[in-house]
Amino acid sequence: MIKYIFVLLCFFFITLHFMQNVQSYSIGAPSGFSGAPGNFNNTCAGAGCHFGTTTEVYNNIIANIDTSGYLPGESYTINTFISHPDRNVFGFQMTAQTLDGQYLGTFLSNSHETQTTSNDRYITHTNLGIEVNDTIKEWDFQWIAPSGEPEENVTFFAAYNAADGDGTPNGDIIYTSSVTYNYKVVSNAPSLSKNLSKGTVFPNPAEDIFHITFDTTCDIAEFSFYTVEGRKLLTLRKNVLDNHKTTFSVGEIGLTTGRYIIKIVGCNKSISMPLIILSE
């Protein structure tokens, strides 16, 4: 009888400890589980906190970094998202590394929904940034490019959890995504080349009219609208040389309620940014 009670107590405390660990991750993921090479490509699916395998997704990380590359010491806005048709509790973790596992730059949280860890080398959700009234969750934050060496291309590695909300590691779905940007080699000689950079959408979410502002010396730019799954809906060409703000009507371009990605192409360069349309 004593042995039986001892076994039950052991099982109770092990289960309690396990549940506390699982629930603690709702306030942020532990560092080192973003699927990056510097962490042996580990994700929380293989760390004991969530069971199952990982699924790779694409185009889930958007940065306002010019296609020619990032500049040392500059601050860039990162938008990342994950979706699942049957879930409304989500979490994530991201780091910036070289392909051989060196950390590059630091992250900066700009909302109560994200937080940095490990000397700002990782960024993850908070308990205020996991639940949505929808089947998609987005996070926005800043990445500060390194001001010195290593002068290498940067890859953003992210892991996501689409949780079923039952407080256990069973039934959760883990995703990974990554995107690489070049290091921009800057010449000391003055440049007269044309440029396109730093795009912003406002208001966002939009109901009727929205504006896109950007820095450019291009004559013509193409504005392409994509679904979050990567399907192109339409492309519009506009003269932008004398007006760095372009206005669109939701009704005229036929966008319905949902989330989209806008890609602007000009001067052989491109920038991308998210857009949310709400019905009136």
Image (cartoon, rainbow, N blue to C red):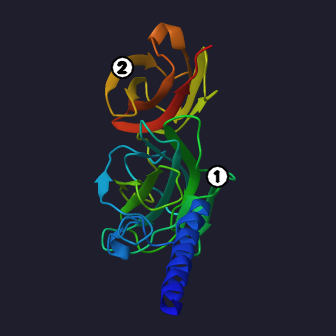
Query: Which residue is at 37% across, 49% downward?
Result: 68
Residue that sits furthest to the top in the current view:
252
Q: Residue 235 carries which label?
A: 2
Q: In this orientation, which residue lies closer to the viewer: 97 or 27?
A: 27
Quadrant assignment, res 132? top right
Q: In this orientation, which residue lies closer to the viewer: 26 or 125?
A: 26
Residue 165 at x, y percent in the picture: 53, 51
Q: In this orientation, which residue lies closer to the viewer: 214 or 134?
A: 134
Query: Which residue is at 58% across, 54% downward?
Result: 142
- Looking at the picture, does residue 238 appear above or below residue 19? above
Which callout, 2 or 1, points at the residue further toward the start of the chain? 1
Q: Which amino acid does label 2 sit on?
A: Thr
- Looking at the picture, does residue 78 appear above or below residue 236? below
Quarter in which the C terminus is drawn: top right
Label 2 environment density (alpha carbons within 10 Å; few <14, some 14–19, many ≥20) = some
Q: Which mark is residue 11?
A: none
- Residue under label 1: 113
Q: In this view, does 53 lie to the left or right of 138?
A: left
- The kind of secondary structure element at disc 1 is loop
Query: Which residue is at 53% across, 43% downward?
Result: 138
Residue 108 at x, y percent in the picture: 62, 60
Residue 271 at x, y percent in the picture: 43, 38
Quadrant assignment, res 119? bottom right
- The kind of secondary structure element at disc 2 is strand
